[in-house]
Image (tube, rainbow, N blue to C red):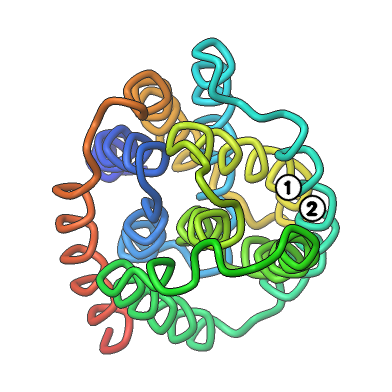
Amino acid sequence: MDILPIIAILTVGIGVGFINIVSAGGSMLTLPLLIFFGLPSNVANGTNRIAILFQNVFAMYQFHKNGHLNWKLGLALSVPTTIASIYGAQIAVDIAENTFDNLLATFMIIFAVLLIIKPQRFVKGKFSLKVSIVLLFIAFVFIGIYGGALQAGVGFFIMLTLLMLVPKIPMAEMHGIKVLVVTIYISVSTFVFISNGLISWDFAIALSIGSATGGFLGGKYASILPDKLLEKILIAAIIFFAVILLFR
């Protein structure tokens, strides 16, 4: 295999791992990049998950070390998410390549729009505790299906849900819950891709090293770095790659 794509993936992985932890949506960049380097869409989807798993393990250590990991809420939300993610992964294994590309591009655009309009501003804190709990578990079932199938941008949907339904949640704690939930469900649902031979291990190892490095740094600095600049860069990159996916 040509060494240049491996070096490019490793380098991008560092930045993406950092973005995934301090914000969300790094997979919106790695998935199109893996596809651009010649991987079939479902193989790119599976390969990306290996890197996310490594990245989140390193980040989770930092969140726990810094006291920003709400284990009780995170583990509770992981149950419906993990069960649903297995179903989502099974859908992704058999999905046609052009369908996957179109779905990914569509969700990338939706993701960018949601980043811009910030809908949590309009509904945050408007539900009672009981209603919020029910809505949380329903939302995380759908998050699990989406995460198992596409994964890209799932961190943003987790954060958006928490911001709307868990009033006054500290930003660092919210990121910690996101990392914990994704780590648990992806460690289970990824076996669906492994068992179907949908992992490019060369790319997975390179991306994992980069993402783990970025995830470690992101977990260390997530509570002190502003998200504004990262959001603007992420939105621009998402729109760019979405257009490429739609017209490639």
- Report the residue at 41% width, 84% height from top: 106
Q: Position of residue 175 (x, y in %)?
A: 49, 38
> Which of 198 and 21 lies nearest the eye of the viewer?
21
Label 2 sits on residue: 82
| 93 and 176: which is toward the camera | 176
Q: Is residue 225 above or below residue 31?
A: above
> Residue at point 64% right, 36% down?
180
Q: State the mark number for residue 223.
A: none
Which residue shows up at 64% across the image and 68% down it?
A: 127
Residue 62: horizontal and vertical position, in percent? 49, 17
Looking at the image, tell me whether mark 2 or mark 1 is earlier in sequence order. Answer: 2
Identify the residue shown where x is 27% and y is 84%.
248
Whether residue 196 is visible, yes or no, is no
What is the secondary structure assignment of the residue under circle 2? helix
> Whole-percent x and y of residue 1?
37, 43
Type of amino acid under label 2: Thr
State the CA–CA distance, disc 2 to disc 1: 4 Å
Q: Is residue 176 left or right of residue 132?
A: left
Is 200 placed left or right of 131 in the picture?
Answer: left
Mark drawn on residue 185: 1
Instruction: Tell me whether the residue at label 2 lies in contact with that at label 1, contact meaning CB atoms closer than 8 angstroms.
Output: yes
Which sits in the foreground, 17 or 125?
125
Residue type at mark 1? Tyr
